[in-house]
Amino acid sequence: MIWDEKHECMPREQLRELQLTRLKRVIRRVHKNVPYFRKKLDDLGLSPSDIKTLEDLQKLPFITKHELRETYPFGLFATPLKDVVRIHSSSGTTGKPVVAGYTKADLNLWAELMARTLSAGDVTANDVVQNSYGYGLFTGGLGIHYGAEKVGATVIPISGGNTKRQLMVMEDFGVTVLACTPSYSLQIAEVAEEMNIDMSRLKLRVGVFGAEPWSDTMRSEIEERLRITAMDIYGLTEVIGPGVATECQHRCGLHIFEDHFIPEVIDADTGKVLPEGSIGELVLTCVTKQAFPVIRFRTRDIVSLRYQPCECGRTLVRMNRVTGRTDDMLIIRGVNVFPSQIEHVLVGFDEAQPHYQLIVRKDGPMDTLEVQVEVSEEIFSDEIKNLQLIEKKIEHEIQSMLGIHAKVTLVQPKTIERSMGKAKRVIDLRKEGGIAG
């Protein structure tokens, strides 16, 4: 279902005109109200009047996560704090959190974009949405919440955790839509299996998953175990939260809501804009947000863009699913390694469970990679030689895909820490002087 046909199916030439009008307006406003941005333009000898075409966007400087932290907490707000009615922030686990402010108009916009997102997943007023994203400063919970209410669905604001209770609610309340991170959905499936819950008896039919990269193989795993259709959504705190892009029923890329966010894909090393279809780092510019409109924000997410029409009727550009992040990318003995690549290998083994961790250490001058992956109790209690055989098979597949050797270690079920939010896939001990085990 298409929530806003006028804008989601707008002819592209008309869409570009709308983007340009909004871009010029936001640049003038941010230049006037944000001293940090004004200085950056002054240093480059630029003024808002230099933005005459959409291509002129490339003249503007990038904004990075480091700069968002540098201006912590409100240095990039383009409205007075009295006009900001809500604040969200990132977790700040790797430094100062990124703080995002919202005016009343921003919150209305956010709900509207989430209504688009959920409608693309065929969520309607007849649905019961179990919102297992975290509430609070994290944008996932309230983003989904107000979008679901906007479409008229019944919302259960259960947040994450207490998985047995989640399943009880799912059964008793007739939940039809589950919203959470994909890794948490697998944890729900795992507990359901332990409780001998037959998922085919439940009314659950759709999963709305995001907030972390996940693969198509992981999607298949989720769909099979939960008996649902799993949809990928995309968003980030720095831009608005969830509601930046979503898959439609054809699941051939995520439509970016371009009338509000102008996307570019750049070479992460040179910063140059890449042609359509190239794989690179996604850069987003907010053209309608009031309180915190980032200009050319480097997301670090690795994607590519396609402008061909989609069968669903939307004319909005599609990006491929995020395969990793430039700052999550591991370089192991000169080879770029993304956790999603390892996941792709692991899901191909029936013996492996979808819970794994990559541990990177130093062995003298050499980097080493260990992949710890859970197996079922039945497999783990097998003969040691059989376990070693499975480890060798997985090591061989990783070697074939990545061209590097990784030590694979099979571990007992529930050995790897679970997360109600984003799964922690990588433990990099190199900077801490970690040594090879």
Image (cartoon, grey):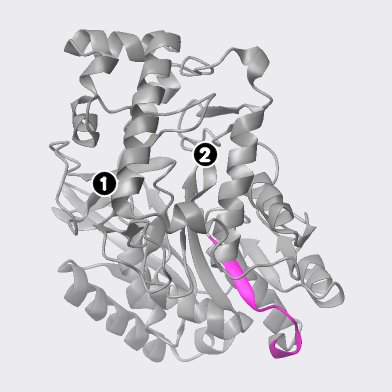
- Say left or right for 8 vs 171: left
**Quarter location, residue 130:** bottom right
| Mark 1 crowdedness (10 Å alpha carbons): few <14, some 14-19, many ≥20 | many
> On the image, numbered disc 1 is attached to which residue?
281
Secondary structure at numbered mark 2:
loop
Q: Which mark is residue 240?
A: 2
Which percent across, then down, holds residue 39?
A: 30, 8
Q: Please state which of residues 127 and 134 is positioned toward the viewer in this rendering.
A: 127
Q: From the image, which quarter does the N terminus lie in?
A: bottom right
Residue at left offset 82%, top offset 66%: 165
Estimate the x, y position of residue 7 in percent, counting from the top left. Answer: 46, 51
**Vertical side of 12 occupied by 404: above or below:** below
Residue extent of the magenta highlight: 200-209
Q: Is tag 2's residue or tag 1's residue first in the polypeptide sequence?
A: 2
Q: Residue placed at 44% from the left, 41% from the top? A: 260
Determine the secondary structure under disc 1.
strand
Q: Disc 1 residue type? A: Glu
